[in-house]
Image: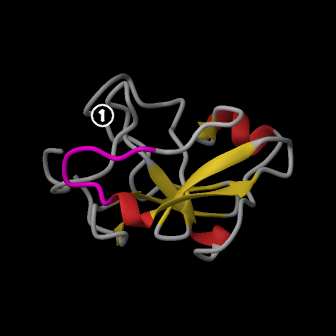
């Protein structure tokens, strides 16, 4: 990703973000927040999978308070951003929205705090 280095993307190439208030532990973006920042949901009975630089050992899932499970990476619940225009876009990077800051996540499992 231009300017951010390597970051995780979903199967459609959309940037994946983490939300600071999740505190590296649980889903806190629900309701109207989840409409703008949709969580990466795990299909019923499915298992998350990794490719490229992503590490399978860092994948997991957590219960979503609104039902189902959200994919996690290094313990962080993962989200996309409705404002991204398509694959490779990271317009949600560094936004202070819905009570906290949003960051793309690197294959290392650390939030990317720089700006593109």
Residue drawn at 18 percent across, 45 percent down: 1
Q: Which residue is mark 1?
A: 89
Magenta highlight range: 49-55
Task: Give the crowd class for mark 1: few <14, some 14-19, many >=20 residues within 10 Å.
Answer: some
Residue drawn at 54 percent across, 30 percent down: 82
| Magenta residue check for 53 | yes
The answer to whether residue 90 shows anywhere in this view is: yes
Q: Secondary structure at mark 1?
A: loop
Q: Nearer the viewer, residue 61 or 9?
A: 61
Question: Most prominent secondary structure in the magenta stretch?
Answer: loop
Expressed as whole percent of the image width and height from the top left, the position of residue 63 reads 77, 55
Which of the 4 image quadrants contains residue 34? top right
Expressed as whole percent of the image width and height from the top left, the position of residue 98 reads 69, 54
| Magenta residue check for 37 | no
Is 107 situated above or below 82?
Answer: below
Which of the 4 image quadrants contains residue 9? top left
Residue drawn at 30 percent across, 34 percent down: 89
């Amino acid at each position: 990703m231009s300017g951010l280095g390597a970051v995780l993307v979903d199967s459609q190439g959309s940037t994946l973000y983490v939300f600071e208030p999740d505190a590296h532990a649980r889903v806190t973006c629900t309701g109207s927040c989840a409409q703008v920042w949709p969580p990466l949901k795990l299909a019923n009975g499915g298992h998350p999978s990794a490719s490229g630089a992503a590490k399978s050992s860092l994948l997991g899932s957590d219960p979503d308070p609104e039902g189902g499970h959200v994919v996690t990476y290094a313990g962080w619940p993962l989200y996309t951003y409705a404002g991204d225009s398509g694959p490779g876009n990271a317009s949600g990077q560094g936004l202070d929205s819905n009570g906290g800051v949003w960051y793309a996540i690197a294959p290392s499992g650390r939030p990317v705090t720089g700006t593109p």
